[in-house]
Image (tube, grey):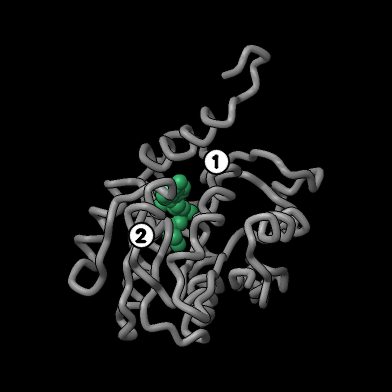
Amino acid sequence: MTDNGSHSVSDIEAELLQTWQDNAGAWTTAVRTDQIASRLLVTNQAIIDAVLKRQPLKVLDLGCGEGWLAGQLAATGLSVLAVDAVAELTHAAQQQYGDKVEFATLSYKQVPTTLAGQRFDLIVCNFSLLGNESVAELLRALPPLLNDAGGLLIQTLHPDTLAEAQSHRDGWRRETWQGIGEGFRASAPWYYRTRASWQKLFTECYWQLADSTEPLHPQTQQPASIIFYLEPMP
Ligand SMILES: C[S@@+](CC[C@H](N)C(=O)[O-])C[C@H]1O[C@@H](n2cnc3c(N)ncnc32)[C@H](O)[C@@H]1O
């Protein structure tokens, strides 16, 4: 904490990663026992469709969690490298999907240098861009990892339909894990951005928005998420 009691940048970004470490087991159970209804009903298939639409051969899954998406994409014949900062998650992923996916334990900070020289047709971030400065730093560093005509897919919470939007001002919020199962130990900080702020971030980090989709929840008819497809600025 800083002197005035607010979080310093590095404190809260470090806490974000620590909470994913603390909650890795509960998260793995929640995903693998289908505790998150919107994933089952909408967002899992939406991101799979968005990836396949771009017809990539080689995909980088950033913030892969327990590996479900990498596993699904590899099952369609794609070559997938999937990374996450949390070793417990990449180990769980390796156990379940390691026969067809390569997993590595890497933080976003480590990705650009550790993967330097590799090229992907598509980079996908499924609900995994949760920080503030760390996300901007990552976005700026990704273009060299893409082949020509490559792109970046980001699925994230929809900025306009969230209770967490509160005042519709950018800022840190807390995931309290309500309704998605047992065993979560600490609330997880995540950084809320308005849609305009996402757009500003993309521009500042030299990405252009080529497409966006808003998959609808079949029961509420509200967007369950937003999926951005970005290309590096020429
Ligand atoms: C909501 S989960 C999503 C996991 C997976 N993409 C999925 O769809 O189930 C967010 C993931 O992002 C990872 N993550 C967040 N910040 C990260 C960072 N700075 N470096 C690497 N992984 C990070 C977390 O460890 C966590 O596994």
Q: Is residue 65 left or right of residue 41?
A: left
Three-letter code, disc 1 = Thr
Q: Distance between the residues labelled 2 and 1?
A: 36 Å
Query: In the image shown, does 112 or 157 lie closer to the viewer?
Result: 112
Three-letter code, disc 2 = Ala
Element carrying mark 2: loop
Q: Is residue 144 left or right of residue 89?
A: right
Query: In the image shown, does 35 or 63 lie closer to the viewer?
Result: 63
**Quick one: which residue is furthest to the top in this view?**
3
Q: How crowded is mark 2: few (under 14 residues within 10 Å), some or many (20 or more)?
A: few
- Pinpoint residue 23: horizontal percent, then vertical percent: 39, 42
User: Is residue 29 visible in this depiction of the protein?
Assistant: no
- Residue positioned 58% across, 31% down in the render: 9
User: Is residue 103 visible in this depiction of the protein?
Assistant: yes
Q: Residue 162 carries which label?
A: none
Q: Mark 2 points at which residue?
A: 116
- Pinpoint residue 80: horizontal percent, then vertical percent: 32, 72
Query: In the image shown, does 2 or 33 lie closer to the viewer?
Result: 2
Q: Name the residue under label 1.
A: 176
Q: In this view, does 53 lie above or below 83?
A: below
Q: In this view, does 32 lie above or below 216?
A: above
Q: In this view, does 44 lie above or below 35?
A: below
- Residue positioned 55% across, 49% down in the render: 135
Q: Residues within 10 Å of mark 1 (few under 14, many from 20)?
A: few
